[in-house]
Image: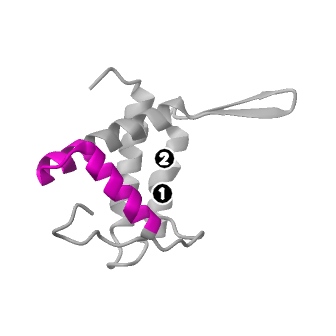
Amino acid sequence: MENMPAAGIESANVLLDAVIAVGAGAPGEGGDATAVELALGRLDAIEGAYDITFHDDVAALDLSNLLGGTLVVLGRLVTVAADALHVSREEVVSDLRAWLEDADVDDGDVGGGGAMPSGDVR
């Protein structure tokens, strides 16, 4: 792994905690919303996870460290899935895109979605 700022690593760990919290509910449920909110609330305590600046009453939001940590974790998960399934990273990403297209959308849902069927990449 390339050098990553500490704020990116800390942010990625918070997001992984939120993933576990989302999966803590019964199958098909969105998980424990309180646990998810608690996990994500910890982002505020990470100096540099995000930065908001104001100039002439215009806010600018810098998510570099938060998104950088997320991309590193997603990249690792795609690689692990590809290796385990003996397929390319591109096939894993393509299947994830198809899974997202089929996902039920609930604007109020924190995580939702169910487990992907076994025996398939998704």
Where does residue 102 sit, x and y in percent of width and height?
A: 43, 70
Tell me the element at label 1: helix
Crowding near the residue tagged with mark 1, few <14, some 14–19, many ≥20 C-alpha atoms within 10 Å:
some
- Quadrant where the C terminus sits is bottom left
Tell me the element at label 2: helix
The image quarter in which residue 85 lies: bottom left
Residue drawn where x is 51% and y is 34% of the image: 49
Crowding near the residue tagged with mark 2, few <14, some 14–19, many ≥20 C-alpha atoms within 10 Å:
few
Where does residue 114 sit, x and y in percent of width and height?
A: 35, 73
Q: Is residue 109 magenta?
A: no
Q: Are the residues at dot 2 and dot 1 in contact (C-beta closer than 8 Å)?
A: yes
**121 relative position to 65: left or right:** left
**Which stretch appears magenta?**
77-101
Q: Which residue is mark 2?
A: 42
Q: Which residue is mark 1?
A: 38
Q: Amino acid at mark 2?
A: Arg
- Quadrant where the N terminus sits is top left
Residue drawn where x is 44% and y is 54% of the image: 39
Foreground pick, 11 / 34: 11
Position of 77 relative to 21 (above/below): above
The chief SS type of the magenta part is: helix
Q: Is residue 87 magenta?
A: yes
Residue drawn where x is 20% and y is 50% of the image: 81
**63 relative position to 114: left or right:** right
Q: Amino acid at mark 1?
A: Leu
